[in-house]
Image: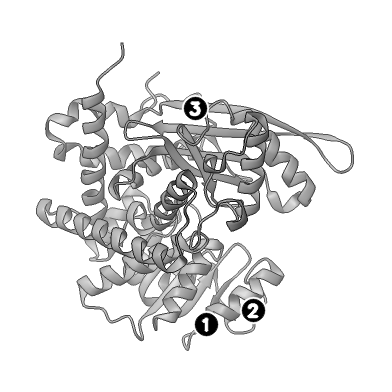
């Protein structure tokens, strides 16, 4: 089946993320040299598992949910990628997210391939017990393809450390022994790593700071607009604020708020913890949702879902750079518009790689049963991510291409070199 040409097996109208990935791969084709022979490897997921997830609800009825686990590529190591619980999850989306994980892991030189999982469900509509039953049944259904040396899930949209604890326990019970390394992003008490919760947001800060330094932008007094105030956006906002960067606009599913004098990220985090959204926060004024994109800022940080910046919004943006905390928030057409306007895009595969880097640290610590301090974790993260960002900048400058293409040149070469060296079996 030619996935890049025939997507008829996917739900109609929901293939955008996967098609965006395919276009991003095509843009790197001219820079692959002899490795171009293997480029089709990147256009076909290695394995797509679709599972039925039936659970008994609290009222005694039975509900069915559709779950997925996609392993896009494992040439460089076991699959690695989060599990998303969201009402709009689809196979095409999970395929794209898994593919972006392949590129991300290779771009920052983690010894992993790319994978992703999800269940089409609104977790806010489930009780805690229903959520636990859903998580355990889903884990049981995908247990045939996951494992600490096969495919290692982690938190994503709609999941957290508690969900990872349930996943780890379910897998371990079925194995007959405790297998802490089957997931990352676990609670500290179950083999989780210090620094993991804020790792993705910290990585956003690190890459934004390095990009700002490269462009001569001083962080102290700079402004940023943030879309999404979940775990990643929350952490990024707090860490940026602690370095003197001012949050002037924020948007989530409940509201869009702005305050030119600055929004206190810590106070907003407390409000969101109580109210489950930014709506009603007293430290900013409500504005029209589309006006969010026209805020005059140094940094625009999309930290929500994919495909948020299209051509129309790209023409409205008044930021000096876009730092992609979310996966796939910018369409290829919008990339072109932003490039023509001189707006720098720090791509997702570098900007939000902090999470998978600390997941790697957690995985290593679980294998050795020797754990590092949060200070050590943060220092290692900053060093490795800064080095990876520097390499992406050098590749982009050498080939006179945007940072995204520079990242893809590095990543795709690494993945396809591994594919070529391993050869085909039989």
Q: Are marks 1 and 2 in contact (CB under 8 Å)?
A: yes
Q: Secondary structure at mark 3?
A: strand
Say few, some or many: other residues with alpha carbon within 10 Å of mark 3 (under 14 / 14 to 19 / 20 or more).
some
Query: Tag 2: Cα neighbours inside 10 Å, few (<14), some, or many (≥20)?
Result: some
Is residue 257 positioned above or below 141 on the image? below
Cα distance in 3D space between marks 3 and 2 = 42 Å
Using the image, determine if residue 402 lies above or below residue 417.
below
Frontmost residue, 17 versus 105:
105
From the top left corner, tell me how far across and down residue 54 is, in percent: 74, 31
Q: Report the quarter where the C terminus lies.
A: top left
Numbered mark located on residue 48 in the image? 3
Residue located at (37% from left, 21% from top): 2
Q: Look at the image and tell me in which quarter the N terminus lies.
A: top left
Q: Quadrant of residue 400?
A: bottom left
Cα separation between marks 1 and 2: 10 Å
Numbered label attached to residue 263: 1
Eye-nearest disc, 1 or 3: 3
In the rendered view, tell whether residue 395 sits above or below residue 419. below
| Residue 314, position as x, y percentages in the image | 36, 61
**Left or right: where does residue 24 sit relative to residue 280?**
left
**Residue shown at 33% from the left, 37% from the top:** 22
Q: In the figure, is residue 331 to the left or right of 305?
A: left
Does residue 228 show up?
yes
Q: CA distance from mark 1 to mark 3?
A: 43 Å
Mark earlier in primary sequence (1, 3):
3
* Residue 375: % across, % down: 42, 69
Q: Earlier in the sequence, mark 1 or mark 2?
A: 1
* Residue that carries the numbered disc 2 in the rendered image: 281
**Secondary element type, mark 1:** loop
Residue at coordinates 41% horizontally, 24% vertically from top-left? 6
């Amino acid at each position: 089946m030619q996935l890049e040409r025939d997507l008829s097996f996917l739900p109609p109208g929901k293939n955008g993320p996967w098609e965006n990935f395919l276009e991003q791969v095509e843009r790197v084709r001219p820079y692959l040299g002899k490795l171009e022979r293997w480029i089709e490897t990147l256009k076909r997921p290695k394995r797509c598992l679709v599972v039925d997830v039936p659970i008994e609800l609290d009222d005694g009825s039975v509900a069915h949910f559709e779950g997925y686990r996609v392993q896009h590529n494992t040439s460089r190591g076991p699959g690695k990628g989060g599990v998303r619980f969201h009402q709009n999850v689809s196979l095409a989306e999970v395929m794209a997210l898994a593919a972006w994980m392949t590129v991300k892991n290779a771009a920052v030189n983690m010894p992993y391939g790319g994978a992703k999982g999800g269940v089409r469900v609104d977790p806010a509509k489930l009780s805690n017990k229903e959520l636990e039953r859903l998580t355990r049944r889903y884990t049981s259904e995908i247990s045939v393809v996951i494992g600490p040396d096969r495919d290692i899930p982690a938190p994503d949209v709609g999941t957290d450390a508690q969900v990872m604890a349930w996943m780890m326990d379910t897998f371990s019970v079925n194995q007959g022994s405790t297998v802490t390394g089957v997931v990352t992003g676990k609670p500290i008490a179950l083999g989780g790593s210090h620094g993991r919760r804020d790792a993705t947001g910290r990585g956003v800060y690190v890459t934004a700071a390095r990009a700002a330094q490269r462009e001569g932008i001083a962080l102290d007094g700079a402004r940023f607009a943030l879309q999404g105030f979940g775990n990643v956006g929350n952490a990024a906002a707090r860490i940026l604020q602690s370095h003197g960067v001012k949050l002037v606009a924020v948007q989530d599913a409940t509201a869009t708020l702005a305050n030119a004098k600055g929004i206190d990220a810590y106070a907003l985090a407390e409000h969101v913890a109580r109210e489950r959204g930014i709506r009603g926060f007293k430290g900013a004024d409500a504005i029209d949702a589309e006006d969010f994109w026209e805020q005059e800022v140094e940094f625009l940080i999309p930290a929500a879902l994919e495909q948020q910046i299209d051509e129309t919004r790209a023409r409205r943006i008044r930021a000096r750079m876009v730092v992609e905390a979310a996966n796939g928030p910018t369409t290829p057409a919008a990339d072109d518009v932003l490039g023509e306007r001189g707006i720098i895009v720090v791509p997702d595969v570098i900007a939000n790689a902090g999470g998978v880097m600390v997941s790697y640290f957690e995985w290593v610590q679980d294998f050795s049963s020797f754990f590092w301090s949060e200070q050590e974790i943060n220092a290692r993260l900053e060093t490795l991510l800064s080095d990876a960002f520097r390499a992406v900048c050098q590749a982009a400058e050498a080939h006179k291409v945007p940072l995204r293409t520079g990242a893809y040149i590095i990543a795709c070469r690494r993945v396809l070199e591994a594919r070529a060296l391993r050869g085909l079996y039989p």
